[in-house]
Image: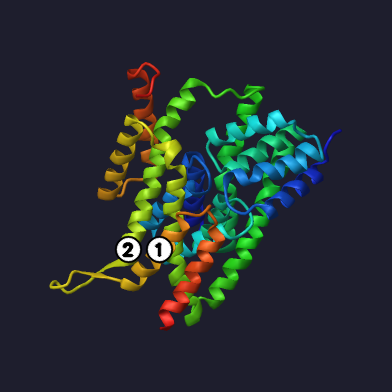
Amino acid sequence: MIKLYLLLFYEFLKIGIFALGGGYAALPFLYYLQTKYDWYTIEELTNMIAVSNITPGPIGINMATYTGYTTAGIIGSIISTIAIVLAPFFITITIIKLFNKFKSCEYVSALFLGLRPASCALLASIGLKLLYETIIYTNEEWSMPFQIDYKSLLLFVLLIIPFSFMKKNPLMVIIAGAAGGILLNSI
Amino acid sequence: MQASLFEIFKIFFLIGTQLLGGGYVIVPLLKKYIVEERQWLTEDELVDYYAMSQCIPGIIAGNIAICSGYKARKTLGAIMAILGIITPSFFSILILAHIITGIVDYPIVKNAFWGIRVSVIVLILITIKDIWAKSVNSKFTYFMFFLILTALMILPVSPTLIIIISAILALIHYKAAGGKDD
């Protein structure tokens, strides 16, 4: 158990250092943790993302608390929540102490020229992988190795078309998905 | 006027309960509670801290809370601010997680979560659409995007490694282009 706590602390400390940007920046890291340790299933991860989106508080903190809880209970949630804010805490305080007024220097904007497309690509890869895993499932039988899950494909099309034209509203997207899920599965 | 540590905790706790969604949502709340009602920060400082919070590692709302708490009462203030902002998250997630574990096996809840899984994919894709224009908009950024996406689709590369490599590539590009982006 102690080993799991230490590992959890180490992984979330790393997320705190390397996840740059808002809301979803921690997501690629949590997805990677899933493939590396199997602390939770992909279904649990998507549930956690959904719940974090509609719970008060910064999404990144919500996701950290939730994954910590799923992995190692209440102690796990305390560890992951503290670990994710620890490094930024010291970095932020050091920067305020050093500079009275923050000036974004040339190097920082040069860095972000590479980091922004990188976070876009990280998110895109997860979006595509989840889409693939949800809509296409693999079969043991060699004659039909792939099958399309038409129900999820239909729901995906029904959600993506209207919502990509609207202002982002996570709560509505989640409610619509839940309603669609209940309706499509009871027909 | 010196802010009390308890008040810093209280205000950030309040802000935490009102935060829905990520990033910039916190700015109007900070403006109301700590610029207008309490004068811990000036409006210019808030703008500065927001810009800075986006460029340093960590969750933006957390970073900006740390800055504001530090401004009000130095390191202790920063500790109070970050504790205040994570406390509502922490308890609401624990309660929800507990409830969900209890009901997740009911068929109707299972079906709802089946649909929510598709919602999450849609949310991720919409987020990409929203950040696309300011992230991928030049030869170099297109190159970076497709290079990294291809790598990720073929190999399970750790995001940490991706971030380090992109930072290095960005600096090489900066040196090679002499500070210009083409």
> Can residue A40 be seen from the camera position used here?
no
Count the numbered circles shown: 2
Q: Which residue appears at 80% of the width and 35% of the height? A: B39
Q: Which mark, by number, is residue B156?
A: none
Label 1 resides on the chain identified as A
Tag 1 residue: A42
**Rendered image coloring scheme:** rainbow
First in sequence: mark 2 or mark 1?
1
How packed mark 2 is, by other alpha carbons closer than 10 Å (few <14, some 14-19, many 20 or more), is: few
Please provide percent x and percent y for residue B147.
28, 39
* Of the pair B172 and A146, the residue shown nearer to us: A146
Please provide percent x and percent y for residue B123.
46, 56
Element type at marker 1? helix
Tag 2 residue: A133
Determine the image quadrant of residue B173.
top left
Look at discs 2 and 1 and give the one toward the viewer.
2
Q: Which residue appears at 77% of the width and 49% of the height? A: B10
Q: Which residue appears at 47% of the width and 58% of the height? A: A163
User: Amino acid type of disc 1?
Assistant: Ile
Left or right for B76, reference A158: right
Do the residues under discs 2 and 1 have CB atoms within 8 angstroms?
yes
Left or right for B42, reference A160: right
Give the vertical position of B33 relative to A187 (above or below): above
Element type at marker 2? helix
C-alpha separation, residue under disc 2 versus residue under disc 1: 10 Å
User: Amino acid type of disc 2?
Assistant: Glu
Please provide percent x and percent y for residue A90.
60, 35
